[in-house]
Image (spheres, coloured by chain):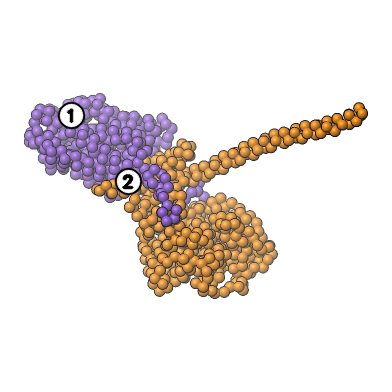
Amino acid sequence: MSKHPLSAPFTRAGMQVNSIMLAVVLALAPGTAWGLFIFGWPALFLFVVTVLSSLGFEGACLKLAGKPARATLADGSALLTGWLIALTLPPWAPWWIGVLGAFIGIVVGKQVFGGLGQNLFNPAMLARVALLVSFPLELTTWISPAPVFFADAPGFGTAWAITFKGLLPPDGMTGATMLGWIKTEWSQGRNVSESYLSGDFSLLKAFLGWTRGSLGETSSLLFALGGAVLLKKKIISWPIPIAMLGTVVVLSSVFTLTDGQHYPGPLFHLTSGSLMLGAFFIATDYVTSPNSQLGQLIFGAGCGLLVFVIRSWGGYPEGVAFAVLLMNSMTPLIDHYVRPRIYGRDRLGRPLELPEARK
Amino acid sequence: MTLLDIHALWAGNGQKIRGGVHPEPRKEATTDRAIDREFPLPPMLYLGLQQHVGQPAEPVVNVGDRVRKGQLLAASQGLISAPIHAPTSGVVADVMDYPSAHPSALPSPTLLLEPDGEDRWMDSLAEVDPFSLSPEEVSVRVGAAGVVGLGGAAFPSAVKLNLGRRTKIQTLLINGGECEPYLTCDDRLMRERGRDIVDGILIMMHGLGCQQAIIGIEDNKPAALAAMRTAAEDTGQGMVSIAAVPSLYPMGWDKQLIGYLTGKEVPADGRATDVGVLMHNVGTAYAVQQAIRYGKPLISRIVTVSGGAVGAPRNIEAPIGTLLSGLLAHCGYRPDDTVRYVMGGPMMGDALPHPNVPLVKGACGILALTREEVSQANAKSCIRCSRCVTACPVGLLPLEMMTRIRAGQLEASLKFGLKDCINCGSCSYACPSEIPLVHYFKYASSELLARDQASHKAEQTRRLAEERLARVARQKAEAAAAAAQRKAAAQARAKPRASEAAA
């Protein structure tokens, strides 16, 4: 006879933690593959270093904590965290940025809180923000797309030197992301349409992903498709992504209509930076988002609002990481105040009134 | 979005169905096989005296008595109870403690009846016209026939009928949902005895004095829906309607079905009758019809015998008190392949340590499940995916309750609605970390109940002790007063004597 709890139910849904993590990784794969393709060997080296260090740090922490390392690593959560950290980094950043990012994400962001399910902040966003604040130069050196096999792509040896030996990429290959470009141009007194021209901006390129940025900031199309698959498979639910994207669209529409020369429109926002990655893969992180549907709507809308505020008026060109982290800190508060209504009770937990006739 | 919509969203109204999960139905093994009525009488029947919610029944026969089929063996006690009748003719062999159909198989008072093989009905069996009886008489006879809720709750049906008549209910809802996987006993009953069910419903409506009945049947049972539609059209007198309801667990939860079919919500401290609704199971309607029209008490039931370890799964009409092992053996089960015996369905049923326990009135199913069918994984960390929140039909936060209970803060779990939990198992089913959430909730509920009882007992003890101290003090004071009085009296008597002596 079985030694497991004798309480029903005796049947379970097929979905397991590792299958969820695997599904998310698979949904990330096309966008990631595209990023690795356009940024070539150095991006691949950094990606591998970051993911492997994440697994290493997770394993070491589990060993230290006396938890079953192999079984827990198999749940796929460290793989996913490492993968997401790699997606937030400038693709040609040196190897130690990846290792440090993995350390911050896994050790500081997750394991010191007690491991899977216990952390307050999204580990990948924590790693990204900590690195951005600590190493602004390395974290803002953006490479122009230089696909493998193309003329200006570095060969294997040069790539190895870029990632592992501190070789700096040639000046002609780096530049600002479009979000950063518009921000600096505005501070120089040039308006949005001038910036589009001078920055050689094309909506289609931004949408498909032929643009500067981290691996997760390139192809809005592929990450949105990955997100749609997760929605379809019910791995994630609609409130957070819809509220987040919806808020950005509404705010950017309102502001571009009132002052189109200062504020770019909704399509620019949707295809720029890591909004798609953030809306479908980061803000939807189970652990750090609220657990009721209404709470998730509030959380998503808050993320969207903060993304727009930071992008429009903040000190940094991109705001997804900050927005998600700030809303992460609100999650316990949202969960405390916004709960589902219990059957037969009102929102405050009082029993519903009996129908008049029967009093 | 209008203001009204925002308000509705905030109040959580406007959802016809709350939560729910879609477990694999696994009903195909038994759904197309007719009810087996050829189950041979076992050598001994074990009739537990407590097969229902409420007080146990009290035996009215003696060991060695010869009884007829349908004869009263044990009478109901108190307001909420149900009598037990002889499932066949035979001799009362013993009244003893025997393992009961309970997760612990705890021995409980049981009447043993040895069948004589003649299966002879009592003489008083007579057909009556139910509609010539007064409504009160209907409940009296339903109570006397030992009818209890056959959907699994085993609540005495007469008590519900009485309550419904007093509160003047408008709608009688009949639960033909059968949302638990594997179970098909209601499905088969509806397909084979639809007219009897409709008759039973009309009898209950007569007893309740209501004019409308709705039978809710999940839309994954097209044959039962068709059969019941025909039966309702033929004999329902235009008062019985059939409604197809979505196949979703727990659609058979009475509140869920009430909400879906009538749009009404039962207040947390109220009953369904408070919103003018009463619900009975289709099996109960059939048992009521048998009891009132034919005078046959509830002595057998239809039970689904299924599971991967059962070679020839089917529904059996079996006498109450049959050992479950006998039913399983009749269906060719393989004990070595069975990792878990379940009485009821896999979502809410009870695990049994062994099948050598008797069939009770509330048992809809006996399952012998194999390793492949039973989840065996160890619980992993909660990833706060909130699938349990989405699945909960009540609107609770199972993950928050679980973390509180795990940390030993049982009272804190009450704030998240532990007392409103219906133990339906949807949360545990949906959990990707396989955390036995319902197990935690049952533990916390019973622990809190035990604490309540303990504090009640302590309070009682303290009061008794105080009363005793007061009594002792009072007695002491009284004794002292009496002594003083005697002393005074003695002195009073002594004085005249002294004066006499002086004189």
Residue B397 picture location, percent across and down: 40, 44
Closer to viewer: mark 2 or mark 1: 2
Left or right, residue A257 beside residue B424? left
In this figure, which residue is indicated by the disc labeled 2? B10
Residue in the picture at 29% in, 31% down = A126
- In the figure, what tint was chain B given? orange
Same subunit under labels 2 and 1? no
- Where does the C terminus of chain B fall, quadrant-wise? top right
As displayed, is residue B279 above or below residue B459? below
Left or right, residue B496 beside residue A183? right
Q: Nearer the viewer, residue B393 or A106?
A: B393
Chain coloured purple: A
Residue B292 picture location, percent across and down: 53, 69
Residue in the picture at 43% in, 59% down = B277
| Residue A277 visible within the image | no
Could you tell me how many numbered marks the image carries?
2
Residue in the picture at 46% in, 49% down = B269
Dot 1: few (<14), some (14–19), or many (≥20) neighbours within 10 Å?
many
Residue B125 picture location, percent across and down: 58, 73
Amino acid at the residue labelled 2 = Trp
Left or right, residue B75 beside residue B393? right
Quarter of the rendering containing residue A272: top left
Residue in the picture at 33% in, 38% down = A334
As displayed, is residue A151 above or below residue A342? above
In this figure, which residue is indicated by the disc labeled 1? A141
Host chain of mark 1: A
Left or right, residue A243 beside residue B247? left
Q: Nearer the viewer, residue B114 or A36?
A: B114
Amino acid at the residue labelled 1 = Thr
Distance between the alpha carbons at the discs numbered 2 and 1: 46 Å
Helix, strand, or loop for circle 1?
A: loop
Host chain of mark 2: B
